Amino acid sequence: MPDVFNRSGDGFGGAMSADASQLTFTGGAAGMLVQNINLQYQQQIQRLWEIGSKKTYYIAGRSAGTLGMARIIGPVPLSNAFFARFGDVCNAADNVMRLGGGVGCGVDQTSTYNLITSNVVIQSVSWAITMADMILHQNLAAVFTSLRTTEQAA
């Protein structure tokens, strides 16, 4: 039956909640007040053309990733342990970050996802404070060597 604007009712496609999202690190560093994270993973592709034909060839090179993370410096003193772990290139073999969560609402989530980065090492870090809110913000950039994804339907 049409509504007051003479539109036919749209079917409800479902809802999603970010309640199940989480970010975990090697060593368990929970409670880091991470506000956002940005992952980028790319592979080098060399394109070649053959003289005398219209064929194109692709040669795949190495893959690499970068990530950026913004967090707020909070009451829990986790930074020293986090930087000792992820700032030391000698720990890279064991450094893993996992961004995971579920899609759906409450316990009826319809699927789960995981983005797993390996060999993570922090490249740079910066701090900023705004006098209006007196919150100390921290931004860091890191590199990683591989990205795995998993998705599972409920």
Image: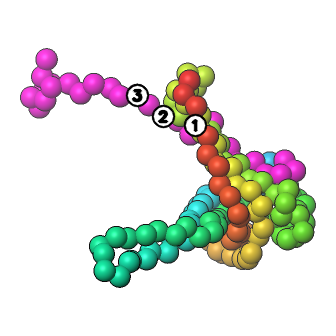
Which is closer to the viewer, label 1 or label 3? 1
Residue 25 horizontal/vertical position (percent): 79, 51
Write the residue at 65% across / 55% down: 147
Quadrant position of residue 44: bottom right
Q: Residue at x 59, y 70 (%)?
A: 61
Which quadrant of the rendered structure holds the N terminus? Answer: top left
Please, what secondary structure does the residue beneath circle 2 have?
A: loop
In this picture, which residue range is highlighted in magenta? 1-28
| Image height of 102 relative to 95, above or below | above
Of all residues, the one furthest to the front in this rendering is 52
Disc 2 and disc 1: Cα gap in Å? 15 Å
Q: Is residue 20 magenta?
A: yes
Say what amino acid the circle numbered 1 marks: Glu
Q: Nearer the viewer, residue 44 or 57?
A: 57
| Left or right side of 5 for 34 | right
| Amino acid type, residue under disc 3 in the picture | Gly
How many C-alpha atoms fall within 10 Å of the one at disc 3: few (<14), some, or many (≥20)? Answer: few
Mark 2 and mark 1 lie on one chain; the one further toward the N terminus is: 2
Q: Position of residue 128 (x, y in %)?
A: 69, 76
Chain-order first, disc 1 or disc 3: 3
Badge 3 is on which residue?
A: 14
Disc assigned to residue 96: none
Residue 16 badge:
2
Q: Are marks 2 and 1 in contact (CB under 8 Å)?
A: no
